[in-house]
Image (cartoon, rainbow, N blue to C red):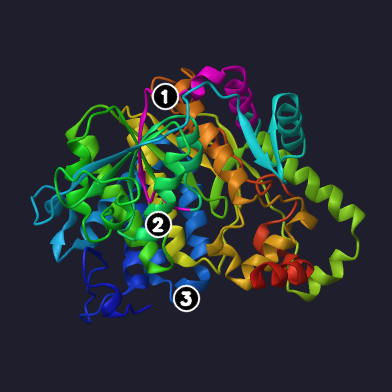
Amino acid sequence: MPLANDNNTHGIVFPPTASGEPSTTATGKAIWSAALRAANPAASEAITAERKWRTNYPTHVRQLVETSVQSSSAALAIAHAGLEELYAQFLFNQTPIRTAMATSGEVELHTAVVRGTAERQPHPLAIPYQGERLQGERLLAQIGQWERTGIIEPTHATGLRSLHAHPEWLDLSDMTFVLLGAGAEMGPLLALAEWGANIIAVDLPRPAVWKRIVQAIEKSSGTLYAPVRQPNLNLSADELPAHAGADLLTETPAIGRWLASLPGPLVVGGYAYLDGQMHVRVALAMDAIMESLLGARSDVSLAFLATPTDVFAIPAEAAEMAKTRFEQWGLAKLWQAPLRTLSGRRFFEPNVSEILTTAEGWRVGITDALVLQQGPNYALAKRLQQWRAITARAQGVRVSANVAPATTTQSVIKNIALAAAYAGADHFGVEIFRPETSNALMAALLIHDLRHPEAMANPAMPLPHPFALLMEGANHGGLWRVAFASRSVMEIAALLGWRAARGRVSE
């Protein structure tokens, strides 16, 4: 797909193709193909030959995951090759990104500080859910319910229970978090501020965004460190929003240099989201900052939220549950057979068709929950984060990379088709979470990953395969364990949820 030049002129940019114009399709195919070439040349060539990338990319993403699952070495080789091709393809103002990150630019960032006014004190774990604030026994009961019904993985439940048992872990006064995309709906800003963290926030220089960030900090026991253009500005909390901010896309090297100068240890999380091709660019911008920090200092941990609408290797136990549910549902719903036949077998596909065994003897299933409406750019942006997560973990970096549930964020509900499918998802055993619940749950898992010595985020802990990092602590909302592949029932879910979705969009 050609890319309008006015959207691709500054900072991290898609490269020009042979025609002289940038193309998201050509660049994306080149990256996926290069990644697969490291372990499956035939599959790599199939990507190069694909003429209907926009509709057929899920087949190739699944092939990449199936190849990666075969062995740890294959997974790491593919991830490394994919990252290298990203940096070979993309540019920063017509300069190779790594070259730009290593040079000094015109922009220099300085630090402004806002301290919260709330008293610092230990907090028991509390999760907002359906209009309530669950804690104590009520929270444990809900965790158990989610686990029994397959909404969360048992390791997610275990992580939450550990945090419930250790409320002292939630005193974050000794920890510093870099939030790239601090104002993002799926980011952990509010929870980390409540728990008294030191927060280095990076977001666009938009006063409305920074007003929200500053107000959240002021009400908490946390401390905010914000980028500003001029040194020694003695700004009040009311004045800061007009001066704070930096653009991840166009000021990437300056942000990297500023963060490298700040005291640590640092936990660097990538949370920024943009639509379409901009999502790939901002994801790569965040990755370039992470990579530069890992090269410049030894006290950096990384944090990611993986989307549930992707292709995943899943635990054998989850795969078996999905297969059993498919068999049971098929017997109970005989009306599905003619509908499946009339659809050319497109409807009611099984979620998991087989259990695979890796070279190391690890048993997994494969689930494909890619959503065509989100597109191949979204898939690439989220995949590059997975590649960075597993390669950094293999290099000895502590990495928190947890699957977050499908959530009714503005980016989802503004798309009426997605909003409708989400509204009808409960008919097929999938729970869609509100942003405040997702944020709190995933922030809690982040702290578990950083505090618990036996968390899979800890590089000292052995992994049966690099993908185990993404399985650990997953909250997929049920997508891994339901009977049907999500795309095969998405239209039916949308029909069932259409009225509710229209009401939400119009609100």
Q: CA distance from mark 1 to mark 3?
A: 41 Å
Residue at coordinates 56% horizontally, 67% vertically from top-left?
372
The quadrant where residue 337 appears = bottom right
Badge 1: few (under 14), some or many (20 or more) residues near its Cα, within 10 Å? many
Instruction: Tell which tag, 2 or 1, sits nearer the viewer.
Output: 2
Inspect the magenta stretch and tell me whether residue 140 lies in it. Answer: no
Q: Earlier in the sequence, mark 1 or mark 3?
A: 3
Can the viewer see residue 40 in this picture? no
Q: In the drawing, does residue 179 fall left or right of residue 192?
A: left
Q: Give the residue type at disc 2.
A: Val
Q: In the drawing, does residue 24 fall left or right of residue 314?
A: left
Q: Earlier in the sequence, mark 3 or mark 2?
A: 3
Instruction: Tell which tag, 1 or 3, sits nearer the viewer.
Output: 1
The residue that label 2 is drawn on is 209
The location of residue 317, given as percent across then percent down, is 68, 34
Instruction: Check whether the beta carbons of the residues at disc 3 and disc 2 lie within 8 A of each other.
Output: no
Q: Is residue 229 above or below residue 391?
A: below
Badge 2: few (under 14), some or many (20 or more) residues near its Cα, within 10 Å? some
The location of residue 119, given as percent across then percent down, is 47, 26
| Dot 2: element | helix
Q: Which mark is residue 52?
A: 3
Residue at coordinates 41% horizontally, 35% vertically from top-left?
116
The quadrant where residue 290 appears = top left
Q: Earlier in the sequence, mark 2 or mark 1?
A: 2
Range covered by the magenta-colored residues: 156-184
Q: Nearer the viewer, residue 409 or 128?
A: 128
The location of residue 153, given as percent across then percent down, is 64, 35
Can the viewer see residue 420 in this picture? yes
Q: Is residue 194 above or below residue 486?
A: above
